[in-house]
Image (spheres, grey):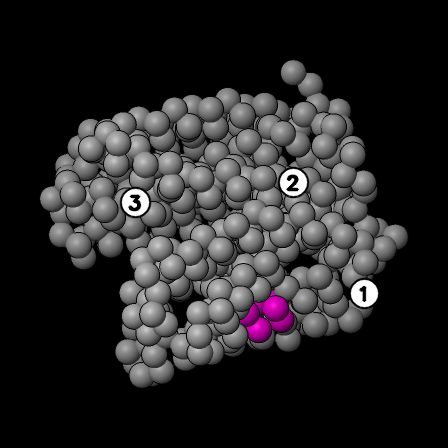
Amino acid sequence: MSVRSAVLVAGFVLAALNLRPAIAGVSPLLDEIMKDVGLSPAGGGAVTTVMVVCLGVFGLVTPMLARSLGLDRTLLAGLLVIAAGVTLRGLDGAPVLYLGSALAATAIAVMNVSMPAVVKQHFPTRVNLMTGVYVASVVAGATLASGLVVPVEHATGYGWRGVSALLAVPALLAALLWLPQALRGRGQAQNGPRPFGEVLRSRVTWYVTALMGLQSLTFYVMLAWLPTIFLEAGLAADQAGYLLSLTNLVQVVTALAVPVLAGRRESQVPYVVGSGVLTVLGYLGVLLAPTTAPWVWMIVLGIGQGASFALALLIIALRPADPATVTALSAVAQSVGYVIAALGPLLFGFLRQVSGGWSVPLMAGLGVIVVQIVAGWFAGRPATLGKAYL
């Protein structure tokens, strides 16, 4: 591998690693943030809510940015804005906390949409492999951030503000590695995205959007509520946390392997259905026997959810014929998908409140996964964007 190729791959991987720490690093520090800034529980929860809303809304501006700046420069700008956002939110006062969080999440939204097109542009013959690398890096970034922010805070003595500012370091390093690609100016206006009309008229778009949104919904539901479910079932708090970490770690391995295998086939249907079935089994284990071999359920759930996420992004990269159309499809699928996903934890908690237990919410989650499998069946069939079929 040449030095130029090595820098390209390293910059790509480090950029992907920066797509979740600004979000995942909030929850472990949230109680301290609330006390320091003087926020109510609702105000504390609003920090994450603001970020998820930005993920859903601002990804739609990516095609316009890619048309004006090119994909490479758009990605570079996203990394710089992440660094600015996480630094800003560590300053004094609630307004800058929300503003900095919104800035970081907006940049992440733009990068979320850009990355599948970057894969198509820079690695056209290795879309399956690099999609796996991308997704595994995203999941690894989330896992590292959620697990390390508190130990880093204790080791450095910086407090939550200093730890938040430290998250700017990997973003700036990724920007430095990506700078050579941006300076070459690849992917400018002449290669910009096609109008949204073609994408919006295709049934492929809506199958992929449903798959992206529903698998994200089931993931965020488990991320938000799984430790609480285990706690109420009688497990210790530390064990509940370890189980959540286990399912996240399994997703790293799955996300790396599944796109490589699925990308070799013309149809991804068997993999999409299989990942959905495994997610169902994981949910059933949590529903029926949460304290009986819970680590087994977490491994099964991690395989299913990691594969589902990777497959949704792989299909986004495979179905369009060119990077420009990938950007447009990615914008629709991820923006609408994250809006759908944002509703999941809220509705899950509401069902828990009105039903008095976790059986009804988990059964509703099973219903969502069944619909996800159906959407994945159509999204996974071989088709070219704009020529979908039923």
289 relative to 108, above or below: above
Tell me if I can see residue 352 in this picture: yes
Among the two numbered marks 3 and 1 on one chain, the one whose residue lies closer to the N terminus: 1
Q: Closer to the observer: label 2 or label 1?
A: 2
What residue does disc 3 label?
225
Report the predominant secondary structure element of the magenta stretch.
helix
The residues tagged by marks 2 and 1 sit, at their Cα atoms, a distance apart of: 25 Å
The residues tagged by marks 2 and 3 sit, at their Cα atoms, a distance apart of: 27 Å
Tell me if I can see residue 167 in this picture: no
Determine if the magenta segment contains residue 312.
Answer: no
| Region of the chain picked out in magenta, as a range | 79-86
Residue positioned 44% across, 39% down in the render: 343
What residue does disc 2 label?
332
Q: Residues within 10 Å of mark 2 (few under 14, many from 20)?
A: many
Among the two numbered marks 2 and 3 on one chain, the one whose residue lies closer to the N terminus: 3
Q: Quadrant of residue 84?
A: bottom right
The image quadrant where one finds the C terminus is top right
Residue 185, numbered label: 1
Q: Quadrant of residue 354?
A: top left
Q: Closer to the observer: label 3 or label 1?
A: 3
> Does 248 sit left or right of 85 as displayed?
left
Residue 300 lies, in percent from the top left, at 32, 37
> Does 169 sit left or right of 238 as displayed?
right
Q: Quadrant of residue 181?
A: bottom right
Is disc 2 in contact with disc 3, using a CB cutoff of under 8 Å? no
Residue positioned 50% across, 22% down in the render: 374
